[in-house]
Amino acid sequence: MSDPSRPAGPRIIAVANQKGGVGKTTTTINLSAALAEQGKRVLVIDLDPQGNASTGLGIDPEARDYTTYELLLEDVPLDEVVLPTSSEGLFIIPATVDLSSADIELISNEKRSFLLHDALRQTAMDAFDFDYILIDCPPSLNLLTVNAMVAAHSILVPLQSEFFALEGLSQLMLTIREVREAANPALRIEGVVLTMYDSRNRLSQQVEMDARDNLGDLVFKTIIPRNVRVSEAPSYSIPVLSYDSNSKGAAAYRALAVELLEQHAAVAV
């Protein structure tokens, strides 16, 4: 029996945490690459004005003629903003610093929270036949992040294995609740993934224990380790799966992709 909650089009997952430096963009890049490696057609939407997901997937700044800014604010069609990456089956809508002014410009738009939602549901999207869309949110709970939450089916939360990691989640959860009440009642938590984990560090172990005690099954079994190859890959503008396919970081993101796919397959049965 098919799952009535399964979206008709691609699954849209917003990767969000208002705290910076938690591995959000790294997770977006490498999870999307791992899903593509599994044969899925994946679109990354760079919604961060820093444009790090775009750089990390090899899109040169001069190649970013049309970006998420034009998609949201200038009605540029999808086929002009979607770019292929060097990874088969993986595409991106890039971002530039222009997006930093979007929050101010969105305020006066009466549909300001629904612009990304509507853009991703154009009939033109069908031609791309994407299985997944991952949105790399900015490290703040601004209108861009709200747009991502309104557009998404679920939120994936990277959680750095450090002191006070869980405390920052309360504001994110409050925002998710507000978005559910106001605009997207079906929005759910996809899961929390522990990042930058050092198994030799007692603090990492304590954060994992606290996260699992407090959040239960919301925490993915897969843990992303602190791994130098994961840190190096962005400087070569490729995912760690391409940079060092045999690294612990690449293995972890492959495992995360498989766990995500298994979860989705289980609810569809």
Image: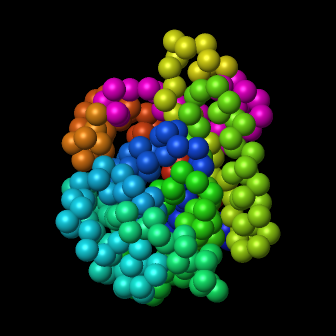
Dominant secondary structure of the residues highlighted in magenta in the image: helix
Residue 1 vs residue 36, the one in the foreground: 36
User: Is residue 215 visible to us here?
Assistant: yes
Pick the quarter of the image with the C terminus: bottom right
**Residue 43 visible to an observer of this rendering:** no
Point 52% across, 39% down: residue: 22
The image quarter containing residue 170 is: top right
In the rendered view, how is the structure colored? Answer: rainbow
The reply, left or right, for residue 177 in relation to residue 94 is right
State how many labels appear. 0
Magenta residues span 207-231
Q: Residue at x 56, y 33 (%)?
A: 160
Residue sitting at x 70%, y 71%: 184
On the image, the x and y values in percent for residue 161 come to 58, 28
Q: Position of residue 183 (x, y in %)?
A: 72, 74
Question: Image height check: is 235 above or below 208?
Answer: below
Whole-percent x, y for residue 188 in the image: 69, 58
Is residue 243 covered in magenta?
A: no
Q: Is residue 214 magenta?
A: yes
Q: Is residue 202 above or below residue 155?
A: above
Quadrant showing the N terminus: bottom right
Say whether residue 212 is left or right of residue 10: right
Percent position (x, y) of residue 153?
Answer: 61, 65
